[in-house]
Image (cartoon, rainbow, N blue to C red):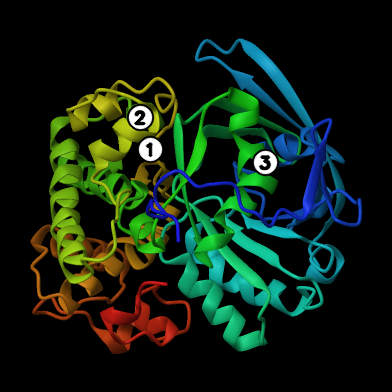
Amino acid sequence: PPSKSIEEKQKPNPYTPRITFNSITINMLGDPLTVTVVGGGNSAHVLIPFLGETNHNVNLMTRRPNDWDDTVTCEVQNMSGEVLKSYHGKIQKKSSDPADVIPDADIIVLCMPVHQYRDALFRLAPYIDKSKKEVFVGTIFGQAGFNWMVHEMEKEFDLSNTVAFAVGLIPWICRTEKYGSLGYNYGGKQVNIAAVTPHEKFGRLKDIFLDDICYKQFGSGRFVQACSFISLSLSVDNQIIHPGRCYGLWQRYGGKWKTYDEVPFFYKDFDQLSADCVQRLDDDYTTVRNAICQHFPDRPFKYMLDYLALERLTHKSSNNDTLASLKDSQQLGRIKTPTEQLDDGTYMLAIHSRFFTDDIPYGILIAKWIAEQLNVEVPFIDEVINWAQDIRGDKFLTKDNKIDLEACLKTRLTSGIPPAYGITSVEDILD
C-alpha cells in the first residue's frame, strides 16, 4: 500500500484506459470522452468552453435547450474587464430529455443549486449506461454530502458502475453575461480539492477531467484529494458566508431597502457585523470539525478547514482577517445582494434565493445534525437556523433547539441531513 495518505499527492493510477494526443482525451476505443453537463448555472458557461477546447464531446441537459447556442464562449477577464483569452466549446447534443444526452456520457457533472441535485440525479439515473465499465457522476460544487445523494440514486436504480465525485469549491470566479452563449471568468483558484468514491478512482478522474477544467487553462489549480466528502460538507464556504452575511444584513437593515441603489453589495460593502456573524458560524463549524476528527481518529481530514485556512490554501493568500478577505476581494466585488422587489416598490432580501434554499437545509442543518450526534453545542448555528425558519415559514428545529426529524423529513427533498438518505448513525456518514 502507498505510504502517503490519500490526501497526499497521488501517484499516477496504473489503470488509465485513455490516451492523450494533441490534447485530445479519448477512451480505449479511440473515441473522445463524452461529458454531459446538467444544468445551466454560471459554471456551465465555463465548463462547456473549457471542456470543448480540451476536445471532449460535450452534451447539455437543461430545461431550456432552445436558449443555448450551439457554441458557448467563455472570456477570461481581469477585473478591469480586459479580455485575456477566449475559449469556445461546441455542444454536441442539448435537450431537456435525459434520454437524449445521458446514455453516452462517460462523465456527468451537475451545475445547479445544491437543493436541486437529488431531483436531477433521479431524473437522469434511469438513462445511465449500465454496460459501461464506469460512469463518473459528480458536481462542480461539493456542499451537502454529494456521496449520500449518489448512493441514494445507486440504490434506487440498481447502479453498480457509477463513481461519485465532488469538487469542494467552484474552481473559478465566474458569471453569466448572456445566458446560453457567453460566460465571464475572473481567474482560477491556486489549489482545488475534490472527493471521490471509490477513493482509488481519483487519479483516473484527475487524468481525464479535473486537469481539463482549471490547470490546463491557468497553469495553476491542480486538484488534491480529500479523504472524505464530509471534508467538503464541513468546509465549503458558501454555507458559512451566505447565511452569516444575510443574517448581518437583516440585523442592520431589517432586510429591506427603499430603492435598489440603497441595496449594499454583498461583498464589497461587507461590514464588521456581518463578518462577526460569519466568524461565529465558522467557530461553531470548528467545534463540529474537531468533534469529527476526534470521533474518526484514523482519518487525516487534511482538507477539512476553517474559512480562513481554506481561503489561504485555495488562493495562496496570507489573509488573517475575515472582513478583509471578503470586503477587499476584487473578484467578488461586483456581486449585489440578492433582493426581491415588493408591491410597494421597496426591496427585500431574497429569502427564496439559494442563499436560503441551499445553505440552510443543505448546509448548516447538516452540521447541526452531526453536532447533535456527537453531543457538541453549536449555539450560533441554532440562532441562524431559527432566524431563517421564522422568516421563511420553515420548520427544522424544535423550541428547545433540537433537530425536528419529522419536519426535516416531511418530503424527500425537504432537507439534506443524513436521515434523509436512511443514515441514522454518525458512524455511517463516511465512505
Q: Disc 2 or 3, which lies upstream in sequence?
A: 3
Q: Earlier in the sequence, mark 1 or mark 3?
A: 3
Q: CA distance from mark 1 to mark 3?
A: 25 Å
The residue shown at (39%, 24%) is 333
Check whether the beta carbons of the residues at disc 1 and disc 2 lie within 8 A of each other: yes
Using the image, determine if residue 102 lies above or below residue 68: below
Q: Nearer the viewer, mark 2 or mark 3?
A: 3
Local secondary structure at mark 2: loop
User: Which sits in the foreground, 16 or 34?
Assistant: 16
Q: How many marks?
A: 3
Badge 1 or badge 2: first in the primary sequence = 2
Q: Residue furthest right?
A: 30
Q: State the image coordinates of residue 331 (x, y, percent, origin top left).
A: 44, 24
Badge number at residue 337: 1
Within 10 angstroms of label 2, few (less than 14), some, or many (20 or more) residues? some
> Residue type at mark 1?
Thr
Residue with the mark numbered 3 = 47
Instruction: Name the quarter where the C terminus is drawn.
Output: bottom left
The amino acid type of the residue labelled 3 equals: Leu
Q: Nearer the viewer, residue 273 or 346?
A: 273
Picture quadrant where residue 273 is located? top left
Which amino acid lies under the numbered mark 2 shown in the image of this protein? Answer: Phe
Viewer-side residue, 43 vs 261: 43
Q: Quadrant of the N terminus?
A: bottom left
Question: At x 53% / y 68%, what residue is drawn?
Answer: 198
Badge 3 density bin: few <14, some 14–19, many ≥20, Cα 10 Å: many
User: Could you tell me how far apart the alpha carbons at marks 2 and 3 are, in whole angstroms?
Assistant: 27 Å
Q: Which residue is mark 2?
A: 265
